[in-house]
Amino acid sequence: AHSGARGAARPLAATSASAMAAITPATRVTRHFLRRALSTRAGRSASAGALRSSLGYAAAGAAGALAGWLAHDVDVRNKALVLPPGNRACCDPVELSPEQKALPEALREVVGPQYVAENKFMRGARLGAGTALAFVQPGTIAEAAAVLQECVRADVALLPQGANTGLTGGSVPREGQGPRPTVVMSLRRLDVAASVDDGQRVVCAAGVGISDLGKRLAPLGRESHSVLGSIFLNPTVAAGVAFGSGGTQLQKGPAYTERALYCRVRPDGQVEVVNELGLDGVPDGACVLERRGEGPGYELLTTAAAALRSAALGKGGEPPARSLRTAEGCNRPASDRGYRQRVCKADGEVSRFNADTRGPWYNRCEGKVLILATCHDTHPRPMRRRVLWVSADSLATATELKRRLLAPGSSSILSGGREEAALPASMEYLDTDTCRTIDAAGRILISVIATAGMESSAVASLWALKGAVEALPLPLCDVAVDKALHALNFLAPSPLPKAVRPLLAAYDHHLLIELHDLGRGEDKEVLARIGEFAKEKGCAVELTAAAPTGPAGAGLAPAKPPTPATHALAAYECPTGREALMLNRFRFAAAAAFRTWCVGTGLQGLSLDYALPKRYAEAPDLPEGVHAVRRLRYAHFACNVVHEDIALPPSVDAHAAKKAIKARVEAVGGRLPAEHGHGTEYTAPEDTRCRWMAMDPTNALNPGIGGLSHAPHYAPDRE
């Protein structure tokens, strides 16, 4: 049975019938032993002992049969739940053409036999599953372009894949959807990042992980261009551009650039390589790829690869041998330079969303072009970091504080020749249901991250192992790990500092605010604004903008235990870097903890991400008839991008509920999805679909996303 509310569980009678089929052999064995024991004289004389032995066999057989019946019944019931929505396709075999049958061998000639796997079953990080005709891992950008050529020639669907951390099903095959087999191309081996303009920028091949990039930039005193909630899984830089992800960092903005190297499939089926990196010595322009390894297109790819290797950032922290230079006359931005101004303007527009059609094609392309490399601005490492936990008596109070911090202040900072208000580095929101769920189901994950490190490859490896177990075609495997995590959660310590726990009991709305000092006292200005706001609210909270002591500072603390009856606001500043890290891990564990909690409690789960208008300060009401057991709301608060997880009883039609909630969000001016991508779960607006079709006129890359057809040249899908 496929997961999803439409794939309802079989009636209990049918389940019992299948269980009885397992019990019958045990009954026959018991009868056999009883007859043998009582049929002979010796047996009759020893009938008591034989009977005891036979009854033992019977009990063991019955117990095994009962356990099998229970496991089968639980498995069937589990597959009827949405945790959140699973793959809803059926599996129709596709008859392969001679070219498609020969494709795996052709791909081995391109990348080497050890980097091609045939008939590989794959499961998405949250939903979607299917079998790929081939799973291929190119090791150079030229090999990636050649793989695309071979796939176009064989008329298969090609899915570019980063770390497979996508949450809407767009990075795995879709069984039974479309007339062509699918090839998945993992780009993780394209793992070269190079310094540009003495580290002011960086150019990344498509497989570079955002976590790895931060480590490689550290020796230069720089930080990467973006931070994602799933950073502990090391998602790729290119995937961030393809979705427009990020945006938690107000000074950095989401993953966006107007400098990239990519491939597209032209209307005539030829593969074209387009260079817009803007690097000295790697000329911009477009070339059609000819025979593999020959012609100006492959010469361009070879030149670009050599340039990246010559200025590569060391994986072990070694400084680069040289730095590439931006080509003279190239003024294209390598970040979203207008993001700060958009976020701070409290109007009826949304800050960012996946269907945004601004910028060159590779931005928010969702796999409809093949990104090979991207160039990004980097940012100076702050001299000091401070992390605050601020609790409010209402969402309105929290929103009022946000607007105070985003509005121009009385002591603005001079930046780039103009005055700008100092901003928090980030501002995350969590409601009480989110905090309760993380504490009830996310402790083990947080402990693993704390032990291994937020940016450790061990965490990503363990997460991949969890996914491999869930993909096993055995009963309960898809929920076994989450069942265990939920059952054993109590063994791990609470990740929250002791001073924060009373705030959770007293308040329902919480902000995790990070402040940076970049050399102009920005943290002190923001901290002073928070103090002024608290004073206006009559809060018994002592705040100071004095220089902090220790790694994170200790200038802010509740004056006495807060109670909602007397205080509108309470705040706590982490005195150590360790506490600050634990709070960040706590926030980023929300999505994983929600799934674990739903599995452990036997509930369905809906997960949505949406952008609300910046002036909208409420939580949209749930539609009539949608009764949530638990409603989690956690958000990138400054830009009003909300992640909402809703736990529903098993009897609810989860897909109908999701459709109704989507309509309610759009009715108040919101946009869905905000940063997780459309994948197979959301239908994109008409202008976005037209943009994707212009990028990929033959529908060779990632067909079926955003409500597009799965068929070649966007022919109507067959029923």
Image: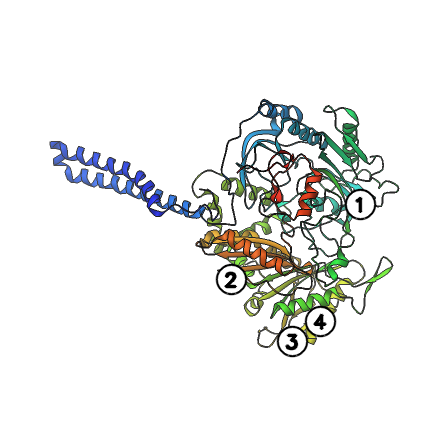
Q: Nearer the viewer, residue 256 or 62?
A: 256
Q: How far is the residue under mark 1 from the one under mark 2?
A: 54 Å
Q: Nearer the viewer, residue 261 or 175?
A: 175
Asked which secondary structure carries label 2, the reply is loop
Q: Which residue is mark 2?
A: 624
Residue count near mark 4 (Cα–Cα under 10 Å), binned few <14, some 14–19, many ≥20:
many
Mark on residue 540? 3
Asked which secondary structure carries label 1, the reply is loop
Q: Which residue is mark 1?
A: 199
Which one is earlier in the sequence, the residue at label 3 or at label 2? 3
The location of residue 709, given as percent across then percent down, is: 60, 39
Q: Kindly indicate whether the residue at mark 2 contacts the one at mark 4 (C-beta within 8 angstroms).
A: no
Please indicate whether residue 483 sits to the left or right of residue 214 in the image: left
Amino acid, disc 3: Ala
Which one is earlier in the sequence, the residue at label 3 or at label 4? 4
Q: Which residue is mark 4?
A: 531
Please indicate whether residue 70 sits to the left or right of residue 622 in the image: left
